[in-house]
Image: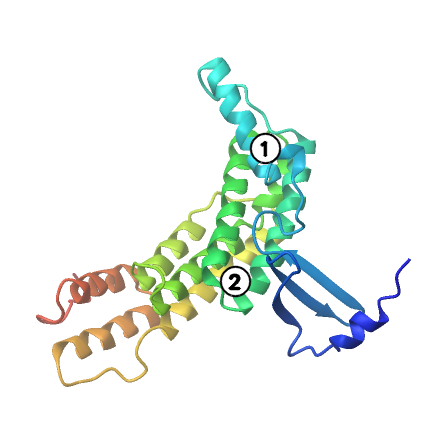
């Protein structure tokens, strides 16, 4: 048995400075979280706990391999099923990825947040298609609005920082539409997460617009119109204004009734 007192004293708990990335003895980077009574450690790649279920990098990869072999053997995916036990294993893995991407978002490692949320998005897609047990399937799908929210927010922030190509506002707008169009799930958590996630993404859209757009040229006027459209939640009009800005800027105002 090992007393952890010295280790904990080396890194005293501070709720404002409780997450760090260090280089381990073998050269790999690991993510650590200081808790009031201990320390958690996450791998930066693969499964956060470093596990290799069934010899695969993740439980999701194992299910994907089974699906590929089923398709090869039968000529299609008909008859492939994710069992309740499979679903529980995938849910447990999804929670590990959730813990990690939440911390990585805090540290602004947006590329890694994108990868981890994409893992959980794909996990949801497979469960929706191949798990026949409602409780097992919806136990994960009820949190899909939040997963999509974090994926879109990370992609938008990466675009804003210049580490990813694309239109940040379009990414957020598309995510809002996707979340709103998700199939209903009889779950208070689903309803709550859908409303909270769309509200968060709308707020993020507003925050990404210039605080004081210039009035010296037509582009400044279009930027004001874009802000107004988002404030009014008129996303169809906002999309038209964004297209006009992207295609070369202001050549007249966008008609609200267009």
Horizontally, is 20 left or right of 166 in the view?
right
Circle 2: element type: helix
Is residue 78 in view? no
Which badge, 2 or 1, is on the more N-terminal residue? 1
Circle 1: element type: helix
Viewer-proximal residue among 184 and 28: 28
**Could you say which quadrant of the image residue 219 lies in?**
bottom left
What x and y, as percent, mark residue 83?
A: 65, 29
Q: Residue at 32% of width from left, 69% of height from top?
A: 230
Q: Residue at 62% of width from left, 62% of height from top?
A: 31
Is residue 35 in view? yes
What x and y, as percent, mark residue 176?
A: 40, 56
- In the image as oriented, which residue stretches furthest toward the front? 26
Q: Which residue is mark 2?
A: 196
Q: In which quadrant of the rendered image does the N terminus lie?
A: bottom right
Q: Which residue is mark 1?
A: 62
Q: Is residue 69 above or below residue 155?
A: above
Q: Residue at 84% of width from left, 67% of height from top?
A: 4
What x and y, as percent, mark residue 200?
A: 47, 66
């Amino acid at each position: 048995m090992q007393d952890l007192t010295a280790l904990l004293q080396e890194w005293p708990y501070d709720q404002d400075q409780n997450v760090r990335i260090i280089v381990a003895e073998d050269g790999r980077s690991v993510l650590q979280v200081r808790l009031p009574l201990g320390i958690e450690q996450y791998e930066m790649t693969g499964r956060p706990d470093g596990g290799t279920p069934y010899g695969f990098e993740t439980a999701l990869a194992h299910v994907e391999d089974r699906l590929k072999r089923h398709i090869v053997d039968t000529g299609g995916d008909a008859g492939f099923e994710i069992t309740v036990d499979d679903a529980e294993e995938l849910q447990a893995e999804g929670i590990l990825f959730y813990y990690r991407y939440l911390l990585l978002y805090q540290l602004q490692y947006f590329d890694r947040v994108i990868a981890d949320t994409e893992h959980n998005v794909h996990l949801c897609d497979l469960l929706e298609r191949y798990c026949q047990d409602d409780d097992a399937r919806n136990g994960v799908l009820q949190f899909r609005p939040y997963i999509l929210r974090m994926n879109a927010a990370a992609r938008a922030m990466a675009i804003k920082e210049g580490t990813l190509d694309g239109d940040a506002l379009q990414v957020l707008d598309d995510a809002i539409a996707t979340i709103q169009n998700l199939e209903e799930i009889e779950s208070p958590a689903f309803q709550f997460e859908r409303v909270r996630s769309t509200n968060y993404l709308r707020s993020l859209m507003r925050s990404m617009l210039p605080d004081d757009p210039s009035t010296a040229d037509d582009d400044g006027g279009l930027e004001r119109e874009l802000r107004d459209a988002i404030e009014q939640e008129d996303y169809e009009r906002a999309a038209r204004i964004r297209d006009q800005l992207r295609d070369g800027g202001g050549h007249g105002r966008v008609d609200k009734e267009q």
